[in-house]
């Protein structure tokens, strides 16, 4: 099955900020050559590791973000390394980089320089604050971006005195990487007509600032801040918690919407079965408008649901609630989804062979299913410098003797 970015060559000068861009393109068919220092990119040293043994080739975080890529380990702070990168860029379709603004200009590898030899090159820069502006020299990390960008103002617990909590799993970097992929895709379409590349300047901070849902617009219109809500969306006023404990001690997310008549009757029958309906059995609760007012201003419905949830396991709450058209879900640990039938039936997981540990490892296949286009990891993430020799000889035409000189002098690995 063909993939979206088949036929494109991407040179990725990556760190933890932008390596997700290359992964998405690699899983979608592009050839992605990752340029990393001879000591290894920082993504190799974040952990966790296989069997808790630190090893740059067995970092699980690196595995996930770098599936299907090729590793070219060279020192671009030295002239020979800069020349190797320059030669690769001369024939590439895309260059994805995240260095501090101005760094590559010192090496003669900025867009103005490399576009002279390859005017079709799309040069995509993902940095903390963009290429200019008063904050251009500041240094950030993922949690700092979530704080400064506004997300942490809306995430965490309802209690005002508790510390805000940022989303886990590199949310700032991931948001920015996905938005960069949008800009790359648009630039590729534009290039079909103009036959020219361009410099894409993507700021992680800007990406975070536009992903605060309604918080910014609500402030602009009403001059009121959103308040953090435990386990649910931030809102201008505090709402009843929708996290309820089930009979097995686990929790479920249980909303109290304006029930349609069908789902309401089914839920009340469920409550009667468990002997917890209470006042909700009374005739006035069959009136949809009465219910809506009570849900909005009272606690009787929420209290009744809480009694019901306490009689069932969290998974049964999910299965039976969904069967009634109610958006109720059990709160799971990520690893629990490995065994769920839903994922198996949709082919969500794909086994990627890791010969270094002697077995295949399940990976998420992609973000979509399609009869026309595929998205899936082609192979495991590369070992450090795994493709250095083949890229230097096959792509750049160096001899084995020249490659040996580069490796013995520390320019390549």
Image (cartoon, rainbow, N blue to C red):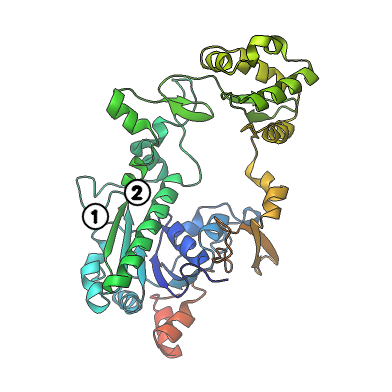
Residue occupying the point 52% across, 64% down: 27
- Mark 1, residues whose alpha carbon is within 10 Å: few (<14), some, or many (≥20)? some
Res 354 → quadrant: bottom right
Structural crowding at the residue carrying mark 2, measured as other residues with C-alpha within 10 Å and reported as few (<14), some (14–19) or many (≥20):
many
Say left or right for 262 vs 169.
right
Left or right position of 208 against 163: left
Quick one: quadrant of the N terminus? Answer: bottom right
Labels 1 and 2 touching (C-beta < 8 A):
no
Mark 2 residue element: helix
**Element at badge 1?**
loop
Q: CA distance from mark 1 to mark 2?
A: 11 Å
Q: Residue at x 58, y 68 (%)?
A: 379
Pointer 1 or 2: first along the chain: 1
- Vertical position of residue 229 compared to residue 347: above or below: above
Residue visible at 31% across and 66% down in the picture: 190
Residue 374 location (% of width, % of height)? 56, 65
Q: Which residue is mark 1?
A: 131
Q: Quadrant of the C terminus?
A: bottom left
Residue 241 picture location, percent across and down: 56, 22
Residue 74 occupies quadrant: bottom left
Which of 345/262 is in front? 262
Residue that label 2 marks:
204
Counting from the top left corner in percent of width and height, residue 295 is at 55, 17
Look at the picture and state if 234 lies above or below 2.
Answer: above
Q: Is residue 245 left or right of residue 272?
A: left
Q: Which is nearer the eye, 411 or 180?
A: 180
Can residue 17 be seen here? The reply is no
Nearer the observer, 66 or 387: 66
**Residue 395 visible at all:** yes
Image side of residue 269 versus residue 110, left or right: right
Q: Residue at x 35, y 66 (%)?
A: 189
Residue 102 percent across, percent down from the top left: 23, 60
């Amino acid at each position: 099955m063909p993939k979206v970015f088949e036929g494109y060559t991407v040179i990725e000068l990556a760190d933890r900020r932008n390596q997700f861009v290359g992964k998405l393109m690699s899983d979608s068919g592009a050839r992605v050559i990752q340029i990393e220092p001879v000591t290894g990119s920082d993504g190799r040293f974040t952990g966790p590791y296989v069997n808790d043994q630190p090893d740059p080739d067995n970092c699980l975080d690196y595995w996930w973000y770098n599936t299907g890529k090729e590793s070219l380990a060279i020192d671009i702070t030295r002239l020979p390394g800069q020349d190797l990168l320059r030669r690769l860029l001369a024939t590439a379709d895309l260059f994805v980089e995240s260095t501090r603004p101005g760094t590559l200009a010192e090496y003669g590898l900025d867009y103005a320089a490399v576009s002279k030899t390859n005017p079709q090159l799309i040069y995509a820069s993902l940095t903390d604050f963009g290429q200019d502006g008063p904050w251009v020299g500041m240094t950030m990390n993922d949690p700092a971006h979530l704080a400064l960008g506004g997300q942490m103002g809306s995430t965490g617990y309802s209690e005002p005195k508790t510390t805000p909590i940022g989303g886990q799993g590199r949310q700032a970097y991931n948001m920015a990487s996905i938005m960069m992929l949008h800009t790359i895709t648009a630039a590729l379409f534009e290039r079909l007509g103009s036959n020219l590349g361009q410099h894409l300047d993507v700021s992680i901070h800007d990406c975070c600032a536009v992903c605060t849902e309604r918080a910014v617009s609500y402030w602009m219109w009403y001059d009121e801040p959103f308040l953090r809500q435990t386990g649910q969306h931030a809102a201008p006023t505090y709402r009843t918690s929708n996290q309820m404990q089930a009979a097995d001690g686990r929790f479920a997310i249980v909303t109290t919407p304006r029930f349609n008549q069908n789902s309401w009757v089914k839920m009340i029958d469920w409550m009667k079965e468990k002997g917890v309906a209470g006042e909700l059995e009374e005739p006035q609760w069959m009136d949809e408008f009465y219910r809506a007012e009570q849900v909005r201003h009272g606690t009787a419905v929420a209290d009744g649901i809480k009694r019901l949830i306490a009689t069932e396991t969290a998974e049964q709450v999910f299965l039976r609630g969904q069967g009634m058209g109610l958006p109720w879900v059990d709160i799971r640990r990520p690893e629990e989804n490995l065994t769920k039938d839903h994922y198996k039936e949709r082919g969500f997981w794909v086994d990627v062979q890791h010969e270094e540990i002697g077995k295949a490892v399940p990976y998420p296949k992609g973000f979509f299913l399609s009869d026309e286009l595929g998205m899936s990891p082609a192979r495991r993430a590369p070992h450090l410098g795994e493709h250095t020799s083949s890229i230097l000889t096959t792509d750049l035409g160096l001899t084995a003797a020249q490659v040996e000189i580069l490796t013995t002098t520390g320019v390549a690995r």
